Image (tube, rainbow, N blue to C red):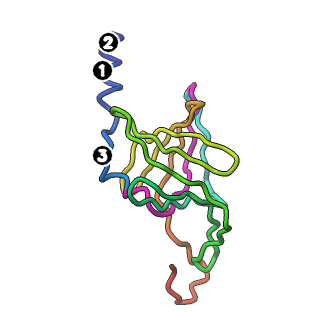
Amino acid sequence: MILVLSLLLVSCKQEIKPADIAKLNGYWEIEKVVFDKGEEKDYKMNESFDYFDIKNNKGIRKKVMPQLDGTFLTSDSFESVSVRFKGDQVFLDYKTDYAKWSEELISITEEKLVVKNQEKKEYHYKKAGAINLLDDGKKTK
């Protein structure tokens, strides 16, 4: 029984290829966190999104705040990101002037992203876009 369950879990994991990394680029909004014991915390509304810009397996991640007119507020702070392939696993290695850490990339599609940190918390994101609630007719960036 344990062997069958183990095979089922392994077979469900997405195989992430180098070409899939380009799907990370853009704005991501957190939907929920799944803790190591299975509890979940849902996020109904977020004040900030994660923005990824990765080329040739290196780039940045920064927090941005969507505005009512469809633009984003940003700061100069960001995290350097390196993508690392290790066997059948893919890791996002982050670095700032103050810290280094890694997250495992569990799955990625055009619309969904799941990463797991070292505390075994899974972060589930959905692709986000600009929000224009002012309906001023201007195009959003």
Q: What span is colored magenta in the figure?
A: 22-37
| Residue most extreme to the right | 98
Disc 3 marks a residue whose amino acid type is Lys
Check whether the beta carbons of the residues at disc 3 and disc 2 lie within 8 A of each other: no
Q: Residue at x 30, y 39 (%)?
A: 15
**Separation (CA) of disc 1 from disc 2:** 6 Å
From the image, tell me which residue sits under label 3. 17
Q: Which badge, 3 or 2, comes first in the chain's sequence?
A: 2
**Separation (CA) of disc 3 from disc 1:** 21 Å
Tell me, for residue 7, which label it has, or none.
1
69 lies above or below 76: below
Check whether the beta carbons of the residues at disc 1 and disc 2 lie within 8 A of each other: yes
Q: Residue at x 53, y 72 (%)?
A: 130
**Separation (CA) of disc 3 from disc 2:** 27 Å
The local secondary structure at tag 2 comes to: helix
Is 29 one of the magenta-colored residues?
Answer: yes
- Residue 131's x, y, as percent? 55, 73
From the image, tell me which residue sits under label 2. 3
Disc 2 marks a residue whose amino acid type is Leu
Is 56 one of the magenta-colored residues?
Answer: no
- Residue 91's x, y, as percent? 45, 40
Residue 120 in which image quadrant: top right
Q: Which badge, 3 or 1, comes first in the chain's sequence?
A: 1
115 lies above or below 37: below
Check whether the beta carbons of the residues at disc 3 and disc 1 lie within 8 A of each other: no
Q: Residue at x 64, y 66 (%)?
A: 65
